Image (cartoon, grey):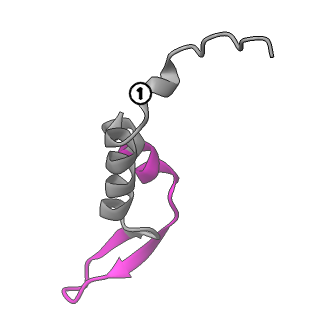
Amino acid sequence: MLDEALAWARRTFDTAIVSAPGGTVHDEPAFPLIAFREIIANALMHRDHASSKPSPPASPS
């Protein structure tokens, strides 16, 4: 899941063309991918697995 999210981010995030001191250029994402990776990793690690189970039927009041 994490790899798919990072691949999506690389395809989707805006980029800027940045010049390096040696005259080379490269694309730089508008949002740091390492920060995005941390956000997704934390969400995956701390997700509530109980919420994926069906809820018991509500009892009549």
**Residue 12: in magenta span:** yes
> Is 27 above or below relative to 36?
below
The residue that appears at 45% across and 44% down in the rendered structure is 8
- Quarter of the image for the N terminus: give it: top left
Which residues lie in the magenta part?
6-27
Q: Where does label 1 land, which residue?
A: 49
| Quadrant in which residue 48 is drawn | top left
Residue 16, given in percent of the width and then of the height, sits at: 46, 73
Which of these two is toward me, 54 or 34? 54
Looking at the image, residue 1 sits to the left or right of residue 52; the answer is left
Which of these two is toward me, 26 or 3? 3
Which of these two is toward me, 57 or 32? 57
The residue that appears at 32% across and 47% down in the rendered structure is 41
The residue that appears at 50% across and 16% down in the rendered structure is 53
Residue 31, given in percent of the width and then of the height, sits at: 44, 68
Number of numbered discs overlaid on the protein picture: 1
| Quadrant in which residue 17 is drawn | bottom left
Looking at the image, residue 59 sits to the left or right of residue 56; the answer is right
- Quarter of the image for the C terminus: give it: top right
Residue 57, given in percent of the width and then of the height, sits at: 67, 10
Residue that lies at the very extreme toward the front in this rendered image: 61
Kind of residue indicated by mark 1: His
The residue that appears at 50% across and 58% down in the rendered structure is 13
Residue that lies at the very extreme toward the right in this rendered image: 61
> Is 4 above or below relative to 26?
above
Which of these two is toward me, 30 or 41? 41
